[in-house]
């Protein structure tokens, strides 16, 4: 591998205190300088004081007894935890000699935050980058990619928009100058979330209730974040894993497609890196419910406090760390806690991928479509939807016939993109996924050696 800017190992992303002293010092001082390459070593769920960034939602808000624990991703470099798998995929490509500075342009297929992460990591490492995205994403996403120097290659927004992104990606693969950080299919995405996100979730849950994880909830885009479920289930096999998706695009629920407004999830396929063996439930969430929820949490906190008869500013600590997909995860977590009859000692862990700063245009669009946003309308929505939901929109996918349906759907998609049935067959065994995770120590050792060159 040619010399490149050093970054962290998987272990150092989970435990940044294990970074070499010089790198740790540079990382801490780089936080105030967005484009300092030392920010690579700030790719972690931990704050500078060592605690894992998270909130526990008040029971007064959720209406359920269980602890709803939300890992907060907005404080990662670039503003989302998706920068982690972007870095891991680029790092592993460099170690394998497949990506070299000065020789390659990085391509990032994405429907959301992964593309921003690709542009950011590429800038820090000195690569030009192009992000392939569908049209009709939020203006803030495009602005952030350009801010990081990334180019945009936009595909038509449609019911097949993600397939169009993959087809456009195939065109770039024909030219050796382009190297694809293919989040939907490359296993560094899985490894980052299994080890780093999964390890962080387990550590946080140990602080609350009975210290166990009763349920883990993560809406799949690439399904990388669902990789954390494998680490959690290795510790707590009875943990129930739920994958929320838009009601308007119920692909995992019933193989259907459709356009929707929850950016970064509901990508209309079973992704290659989705280990469906460890997904137990699919939960449908209406896309506009997520946007209404964001409006209430971010813009109408006094109204919620009034509805719940809470003290003024009771909810202020929960302003800022949530985006639209975060609200999707929270709504699904509340519904799963109710569905599983979880009590005050039980923990549900979920993820807030990014923060409110990426969605002001989305709330402006809601105001245009639903004007006027009367208090009575918002109160009715909160009382009937935020704490409610249709029990028929929770599907148990543990039965064999459901697993087989999801496997068939994966095969239909990925044989189109040159993956063999033999390879896909291996993914039907947990042994495959455990072997991929077992590569992490070897990768870490190779990176440490490369840093010393």
Image: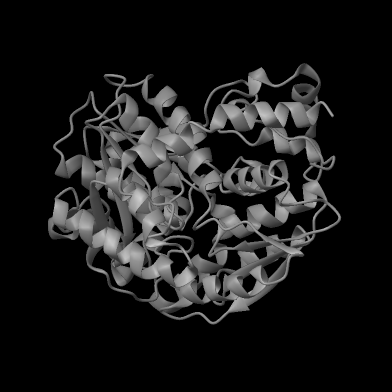
Is residue 45 visible in the rendered structure shown here?
yes
Quadrant of the frame with the C terminus: top right
The scheme the figure's colours follow is: one colour
Q: Which of 26 and 276 lies nearest the eye of the viewer?
A: 276
Horizontal and vertical percent position of residue 113: 57, 56
Could you tell me residue 16's position as x and y percent? 64, 24
Q: Is residue 157 above or below residue 42?
A: below
Can residue 389 be seen at all in this image of the molecule? no
Tell me how many marks there are.
0
Q: Quadrant of residue 175?
A: bottom right
The residue that appears at 46% across and 45% down in the rendered structure is 352
Q: Residue at 50%, 56% (x, y): give it.
A: 185
In the figure, is residue 216 to the left or right of 35? left
Query: Residue at left 53%, top 70%?
Result: 166
Residue 110: horizontal and vertical position, in percent? 56, 63
Residue appearing at x 28%, y 64% in the figure: 408
Q: Looking at the picture, how far across and down is residue 421, in whole percent?
A: 37, 61
Direction from residue 30 to residue 90 in the image, left or right: left
In depth, the one of 448 and 142 nearer the eye is 448
- Please state, as top left, top right, bottom left or bottom right, where the N terminus lies in the image: top right
Closest to the observer: 404 or 220? 404
In this view, the residue in front, 121 or 248, is 121
């Amino acid at each position: 591998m040619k010399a490149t800017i050093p970054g962290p190992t998987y272990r150092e992303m989970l435990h940044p205190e294990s970074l070499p002293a010089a790198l740790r010092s540079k990382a801490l001082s780089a936080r105030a300088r967005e484009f300092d390459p030392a920010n690579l070593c700030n790719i972690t769920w931990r704050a500078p004081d060592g605690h894992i960034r998270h909130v526990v939602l008040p029971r007064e808000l959720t209406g359920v007894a269980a602890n709803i624990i939300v890992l907060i991703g907005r404080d990662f470099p670039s503003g989302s935890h998706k920068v982690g798998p972007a870095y891991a995929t680029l790092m592993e490509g460099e170690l394998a000699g497949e990506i070299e500075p000065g020789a390659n342009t990085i391509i990032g297929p994405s429907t959301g935050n992964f593309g921003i992460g690709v542009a950011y990591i590429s800038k820090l490492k000195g690569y030009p980058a192009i992000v392939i995205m569908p049209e009709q994403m939020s203006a803030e996403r495009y602005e952030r990619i350009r801010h990081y120097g990334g180019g945009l290659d936009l595909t038509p927004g449609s019911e097949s928009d993600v397939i169009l992104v993959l087809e456009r990606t195939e065109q770039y693969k024909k030219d050796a100058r382009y190297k694809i950080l293919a989040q939907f299919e490359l296993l560094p995405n899985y490894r980052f979330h299994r080890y780093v996100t999964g390890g962080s979730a387990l550590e946080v849950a140990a602080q609350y209730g009975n210290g166990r994880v009763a349920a883990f909830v993560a809406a799949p885009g690439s399904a990388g974040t669902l990789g954390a479920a494998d680490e959690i289930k290795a510790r707590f096999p009875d943990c129930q894993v739920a994958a929320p998706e838009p009601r308007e695009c119920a692909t995992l629920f019933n193989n259907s497609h459709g356009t929707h407004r929850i950016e970064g999830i509901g990508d209309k396929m079973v992704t290659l890196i989705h280990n469906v063996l460890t997904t137990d439930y699919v939960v449908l969430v209406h896309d506009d419910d997520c946007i209404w929820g964001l409006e209430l949490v971010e813009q109408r906190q006094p109204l919620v406090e009034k509805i719940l008869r809470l003290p003024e500013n009771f909810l202020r600590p929960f302003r800022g760390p949530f985006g639209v997909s975060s609200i999707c995860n929270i709504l699904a977590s509340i519904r799963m806690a109710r569905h599983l009859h979880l009590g005050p000692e039980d923990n549900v862990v979920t993820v807030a991928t990014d923060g409110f700063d990426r969605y002001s245009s989305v709330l402006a669009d809601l105001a245009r479509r639903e004007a006027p946003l009367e208090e009575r309308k918002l109160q009715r929505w909160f009382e009937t939807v935020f704490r409610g939901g249709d029990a028929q929109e929770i599907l148990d996918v543990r039965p064999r016939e459901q697993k087989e349906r999801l496997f068939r759907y994966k095969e239909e998609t990925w044989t189109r993109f040159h993956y063999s049935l033999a390879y896909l067959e291996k993914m039907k065994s947990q042994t495959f996924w455990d072997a991929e995770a077992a590569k992490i120590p070897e990768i870490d050792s190779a990176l440490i050696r490369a840093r010393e060159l």
